[in-house]
Image: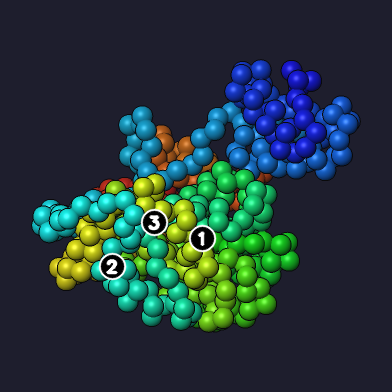
Amino acid sequence: MNDQITGTTASDIATSVRELRDRGVLRPGSPLPPVRELAARLGVNRNTTVAAYRQLAQAGLVVSRGRAGTMLVEHDAVAQEGYAADTVLRDVGTGNPDPRLIPDPTPVLATVTGRPVLYGEPVIDTDLEAWARQWISPDLPADDFRITITSGAVDAVERLLAQALMRDDAVALEDPCFLASIHTVRLGGYRAVPVPVDDEGMTVDGLRAALEAGVRAIICTPRAQNPTGVSLSPARAAALRALLAEHPYVLIIEDDHFSMLSARGYESLIGPDHRRFALLRSVSKFLGPDMCLAVAATDPETAERLAMRLSPGTTWVSHLLQRLTLGLLDDKDVRGAIRAAGAHYAEHNAAFAEQLRAHGIQTRYVDGMNLWVELPIPAQTVSERLMRRGWLVRTGDGFSLTNADTPSRHLRLTVHDLTDDEAEQLVADIAGAVR
């Protein structure tokens, strides 16, 4: 049914394919015609069909199989954090915090009620804004910044990209990359440009290549990078800032998701004279994923654009949630519990990594909620063998932006909530699975 594809522009062709898929004319797994063949039939330039296929790929609707051609994906789902549904296996790939370490909000709840907030009032609680400014200002080199409150970091990233970019604009992403960033860029119709990550964070050569490729935004996790756990070293951060000094209008988005849980210092890509930036700190890792709130510290112009997308009466963040967040973060006992939770994650992940090394699997814990394990054989093989032993793990394939045809040799494990006996058993099973 490929002869039913119509259109004279990339957008029209992509829309036509979408509609044929929605009507069931094109089914999952259906091949699309080669770009030259489709361009000839539609009477358009080959580059037009290339752009159409690129739009479809960025939306997660098609996948290129090299010489096998381009075909509709089998399903629209993309990898997400959280427990896998419908499995009896022990899931150690969730990315979740330990629920036992999330502070109980009950004592603070009674203190946050009061006068209702009505349409037309300020969208940010003034006390939370003042607290957030003190929280962020020591780690933000720029002096002139504004505070915005969003419904979590993913919401902030989506809004930041939407106010700064157009469809098919290029965005630099760490490789391997946080699943939500891949998802957000793909659904937004932007073009992901991978920047390799090593033990010191984003590489200078990788970012230079991305800038030369014309990226208009950069999404970076300066510490506890997900999935690797690495953090920017001071030297690497300085080198990246020097490189970015020549590109002051490229939007830098820093996602400091592990903030209060991390014992490492904060290093930033944002220089004192950079013109477009956003430093994001969500509370989901330490106050719980259901506390959908993030602080965004941005340059004034970006703040103005975000304000238009967070107007009263449409999508501002609940003031009850803002007050609850402030009440928790301003409580010394809660802050102590958060520090204890950070120490728990570090201790358990480091101990698990040490046990793996004792079995000859070279793993190093740096920071973060999870553990990035390098394997001597393809991760998918190890995953299948672990399933037969009762474990469900997450391979590194879903985090990769490059080498789609090269199987990953990494697992990202969430093991901080395992008992000592469970951890010992998983280590033994991984060691057995790699033999």
According to the picture, the residue beneath numbered tag 1 turns out to be 305
Determine which residue is flagged by label 3: 150
Q: Could you say which is closer to the camera, residue 133 or residue 429?
A: 133
In this view of the protein, which residue sits in the foreground, 114 or 260? 114
Residue topped by disc 2:
126
Mark 1 touching mark 2, by CB under 8 A? no
Q: Residues within 10 Å of mark 1 (few under 14, many from 20)?
A: some
Q: How many marks?
A: 3
Residue flagged by tag 2: what amino acid is it? Thr
For the point 42% across and 54% down, the residue is 310
- Residue at point 49%, 75% (across, down): 268
Amino acid at dot 1:
Arg
- On screen, residue 390 versus residue 299, left or right, reads left
Q: Vertically, is 188 above or below 64?
A: below
Residue 353 in picture, x, y percent from top left: 38, 61
Residue sitting at x 50%, y 71%:
299
Q: Nearer the viewer, residue 48 or 36?
A: 48
Secondary structure at badge 1 equals helix
- Quarter assignment of residue 285: bottom left
Q: Residues within 10 Å of mark 2 (few under 14, many from 20)?
A: few
Between discs 1 and 3, the one toward the N terminus: 3
Indicate the amino acid at tag 3.
Thr
- The answer to whether residue 383 of the structure is visible from this angle is yes
Left or right of residue 66: residue 21: left
The colour scheme applied to this rendered structure is: rainbow
Q: Is residue 67 left or right of residue 345?
A: right
Q: Residue 10, image x and y in percent?
A: 75, 38
Disc 2, SS: helix
Could you say where residue 156 lies in the image, as x and y percent from the top left?
45, 56
Q: Residues within 10 Å of mark 3 (few under 14, many from 20)?
A: many
Question: What's the CA distance linking mark 2 and mark 3?
Answer: 15 Å
